[in-house]
Image (tube, rainbow, N blue to C red):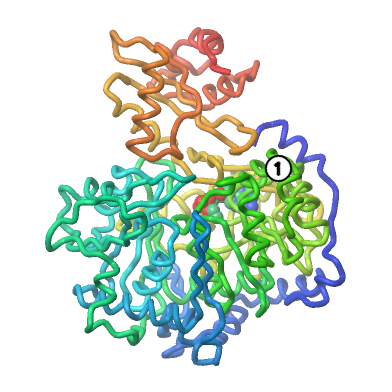
Amino acid sequence: MSDDSITSILKEDRVFNPTAEFSSDAHVKSLKEYKKIYKKSIEHPEKFWAEKAKQLHWFKKWHTILRNDHGFFKWFEGGELNISYNCLDRHVNAGKGNKLALIWEAEDGEVKRYTYSELLAEVCKFSNVLKGHGLKRGDRVCIYMPMVPELAIAMLACARIGAIHSIVFGGFSSDSLKDRIDDCEAKLVITADGTFRAGKIIPLKVNVDLAIKKNKSVEKVVVVKRCKNKVTMKKKRDLWWHDEISKDNIEDTCPAESMHSEDSLFILYTSGTTGKPKGVLHTQAGYLLYVYQTFKWVFDAKDNDVYWCTADIGWITGHSYIVYGPLANSSTTLMFEGVPTYPSPDRFWKIVEKHKVSVFYTAPTAVRALMRLGDEWPKKCNLKSLRLLGTVGEPINPEAWIWYHKIIGKEKCPIVDTWWQTETGGIMITPLPGATPTKPGSATLPFPGIVPAILKEDGSEAKANEGGNLVIKKPWPGMLRTVWGDPQRYKETYFGKYEHIYLAGDSARYDRDGYFWVMGRNDDVIKVSGHRIGTAEVESHLVSYKDVAEAAVVPIPHKIKGWSIYAFVTLKKGTKGTEKTRKNIVAHVAKEMGHIAKPERIQFTDFLPKTRSGKIMRRILKAIAEGKKDVGNTTTLADPSVVPRLIKGRIK
Ligand code: WTA
């Protein structure tokens, strides 16, 4: 976030109380009640979580609630359950088979609906397909799909048979897909012939073909026919989804594997400080319990809710709060294939009206973009069904918060600004909508059982409003268990700075009321439209372009996206920094990594600010890119005279 918006947040002191009507019916009804629950939850966290865990269906009860195994945390050891069983069979067995589980709206407006019984049958059929191709517990399945129901079905089917899914966001390129498939040694890939985006067909299967060209682990590729796009099917390797599930021997029942609490559930790759994305690993019981309980309290789950989270399932928000959290609570979850503004700027609001959405969860970047298009679009639609709003992914600026509150929430819907991460599995700092008075721009207070703190570099606790590193002091059930194939990296990244304390990688402060204000990343991660992009990964794709010698990437504030990418690029001798070169470089990054990683601006330069030992000083580049007059201390630079020259060449 820019300094201007930080200042505006520091001045923000408006407080919004939940309405009496909302509170009286909520799971947690007052701040007093929250405080009581919170106090108990952190005095006896194991007791608190064990109590909640009883609401799930266990094939076998646990014997140990929590164990620290040399820095690797284990929850509910001895217990056995299945997340797909908990999301489907449990509700069907309880007589809710006819309740709507999933509503899907396609980009062209087509709608499909699945009751809990129907979804269970589809999941069982696909589980049997997977088993028929030799998939078993512990095998990895890579899912690279558009937002179609088959994506949710595929996840739940993997979970049902104990296979580990690793979903790769459909906006990633074949190269990024290849790295992820190779790293987890996937045995099977599920994809689609293509997807629609703002009326255009985006191919997906061809990216899979490229990604697995030299791969040895992938045995089969299952392809969903979505847009009748022409694809090449490799004999014996590639199979059509619709052929597979309609085979005579495919039954619509399939027993759920009894999984140990700490068996792996899924891997989700996310950007970190070094180039290679990290495979964040989540396991069965703790993750399920955590998304179950957070969904219930944060979104105040009610039996007649229609809940819509606009994220893509390729990110953690979609895993936890489109699929697992809502289904574990027997809610009706809506899944949308398209974008907010196609075919017209009121697409989101039309969906709310059409399906009578009651709980709506989106990203601040979407709120800002929709706000810019003018109030007339939401005002044309009937948004009366809405009772609760949420945001996730980045700080929300007070201006956007107020617009969301007034124009979308009609000043009656509480807003839950939820702070969390891929690694945390679920929501960590958040209002509870019936209990917590909100302040625009603050994620407010910790969820029960969560102990956040702000630490200074030396490990001491920061005082109110002082600011520092956001950490979590106690383990929680939804936390990542390790980095796939690299336990050392797990220890170093998350527990390397402060002993036994989880480092989030964000800077934040708390105010005099104990409310948390998250400022943004303090590592080499840029949040572009809420998507998590590693600068090192972008840089490696920049230098892989034939004419680029060296590159350094920094974030700059962006009105809609929150942040965007500014790249300093040194070209190889003999190449000129023309507009054509710039365009080619941007296209190269889009092709190699994906559109979301495209640099917004490129400054060509013959020199980068380096220390005497050759380290690029990104702090200085960041100040230059942001147009700051004072770029800070430059005395450690090998050649401080590069600074004024770089300032002169800044791209506005
Ligand atoms: C940022 C997304 C401020 C933060 C669920 C975090 C937020 C990163 C908020 C994780 C929020 C997420 N306020 N910042 N409410 N929510 N962030 O792994 O920088 O894609 O570290 O998970 O998003 O991004 P990730």
Determine whether 350 is above or below 611 in the image.
Answer: below
User: As shown in the figure, which amino acid type bears the numbered disc 1?
Assistant: Met
Q: Look at mark 1 in the image and give the residue it sits on.
A: 371
Q: Is residue 213 left or right of residue 617?
A: left
- Circle 1 — which element? helix
In this orientation, does residue 498 appear?
A: no
The quadrant in which the C terminus is found is: top right
Q: Nearer the viewer, residue 72 or 399?
A: 399
Crowding at label 1, few (<14), some or many (≥20) Cα neighbours within 10 Å? Answer: many
Which residue is rendered at x = 62% and y = 37% of the image?
A: 560
In the rendered image, which quarter is residue 228 located in? bottom left
Q: Position of residue 257 (x, y in %)?
A: 34, 83
Q: Position of residue 53 (x, y in %)?
A: 55, 82
Q: Position of residue 36 (x, y in %)?
A: 76, 75
In this orientation, does residue 175 appear?
A: yes
The quadrant in which the N terminus is found is: top right
Q: Nearer the viewer, residue 228 or 411?
A: 228
Q: Is mark 1 within 8 Å of ligand 1?
A: no
Determine whether 434 is above or below 400 in the image.
Answer: below
In the rendered image, which quarter is residue 557 located in? top right
Which residue is rendered at x = 56% and y = 22% of the image?
A: 625
Q: Nearer the viewer, residue 319 or 183?
A: 319
Which residue is rendered at x = 36% and y = 70% of the image?
A: 264
Q: Is residue 120 left or right of residue 498?
A: left
Q: Position of residue 220 (x, y in %)?
A: 20, 63
Q: Nearer the viewer, residue 371 or 356?
A: 356
